Image: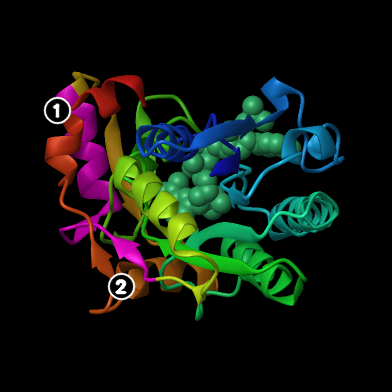
């Protein structure tokens, strides 16, 4: 199959591209670096020519609901329109486990993205994943200095590598609307994995475990993000991931 991966240079996107190629598919990377912008639509038509399926793993780093909504709603609309034009038969969107009751900030935008995908005319599958093992590093990179703020979060983190492979299996299975969620093997808190990562990397920063205010903070701390018993479980633990090449390149 010819699989276009929007966000194919990102944390999970690069693993989806690798998994697709390893399974014998042709993978096309869509990112601004390769001249494709899902927000403006630039380059989409050419990049999707001949594609059988699109995996959308684009993202924006923001807690602003307005910015995130603009990104995910506009990006999804542009992708779906170009897919319809190109005759793409399957749109796969990656969302986040357990966000139904946390309809605010970034998560509200992900729910809006799910609705836009479901309302579109391209056959689709929505896959929800837990926070990646790479998530602590993404949060750490937001603010420098001697302190690191870890919003109080109960989660079941999963290796982006395992999510990338799951996305390719979902493409191969064809459109089903909603795929099995994927989570990691163990319950963790964001503060604890952040401390372990800093210690492993030999970086001295004090981690502050801060319960964020409002519905967002309550949702993060509630345990909802750990998903339910029906989720597929990845095998790579956070500590195994820390010692792996994936952490060295993350
Ligand atoms: N991170 C997590 O823990 C986690 C957990 C569950 C689900 N998810 C979901 O997984 C998806 C991917 O997250 P991630 O952490 O892998 O993201 P990421 O590492 O930030 O990568 C984002 C990707 O999107 C591309 N991109 C950004 N703006 C673009 C634009 N306007 N046009 C085209 N490409 C654009 C980036 O490439 P360029 O900058 O070169 O354009 C990059 O390849 C998101 O939908 C996220 O909600 C993430």
From this view, report whether residue 124 is shown above or below residue 8: below
Alpha-carbon span between mark 1 and mark 2:
26 Å
* Highlighted range, magenta: 180-200
* Disc with the residue nearer the chain's start (1 vs 2): 2
Residue at the spot 54% in from the left edge and 34% down from the top edge: 27
What's the coloring here? Answer: rainbow
Residue at 83 percent of width and 39 percent of height:
45
In the picture of the structure, the residue carrying the numbered disc 2 is 223
Residue 241 pos. (x, y %): 19, 36
Q: Residue at x 28, y 44 (%)?
A: 159
SS of the residue at dot 1? loop
Asked which quadrant contains residue 76, the reply is bottom right
Q: Which residue is mark 1?
A: 243
Placement of the C terminus among the 4 image quadrants: top left
Magenta-colored stretch includes residue 234 = no
- Mark 1, ligand 1, within 8 Å: the answer is no
Counting from the top left corner in percent of width and height, residue 147 is at 36, 33
Q: Position of residue 59 (x, y in %)?
A: 61, 44
Query: Taking the image as drawn, is residue 120 in sight?
Result: yes
């Amino acid at each position: 199959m010819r699989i276009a991966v929007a966000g194919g240079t990102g944390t999970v996107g690069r693993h989806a591209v690798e998994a697709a190629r390893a399974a014998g598919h042709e993978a096309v990377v869509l990112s601004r670096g390769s001249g494709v912008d899902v927000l403006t639509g630039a380059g989409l038509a050419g990049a999707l020519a001949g594609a059988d399926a699109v995996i959308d793993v684009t993202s924006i780093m923001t807690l602003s609901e307005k910015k995130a909504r603009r990104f995910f709603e506009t990006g999804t609309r542009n992708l779906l329109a170009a897919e319809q034009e190109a005759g793409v038969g399957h749109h796969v969107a990656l969302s986040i486990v357990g966000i139904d009751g946390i309809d605010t900030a970034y998560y509200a935008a992900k729910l809006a993205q799910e609705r836009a995908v479901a309302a579109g005319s391209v056959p689709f599958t929505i896959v929800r994943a837990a926070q990646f093992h790479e998530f602590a590093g993404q949060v750490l990179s937001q603010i420098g200095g001697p302190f690191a703020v870890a919003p109080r979060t109960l989660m079941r983190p999963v290796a982006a590598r395992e999510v990338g492979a799951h996305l390719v299996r979902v493409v191969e299975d064809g459109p089903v609307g909603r795929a099995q969620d994927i989570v990691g093997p163990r319950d963790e808190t964001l503060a604890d994995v952040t401390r372990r990562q800093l210690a492993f990397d030999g970086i001295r920063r004090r981690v502050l475990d801060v319960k964020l205010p409002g519905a967002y903070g309550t949702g993060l701390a509630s345990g909802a993000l750990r998903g339910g018993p029906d989720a597929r479980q990845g095998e790579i633990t956070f500590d195994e991931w820390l010692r792996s090449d994936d952490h060295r390149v993350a």
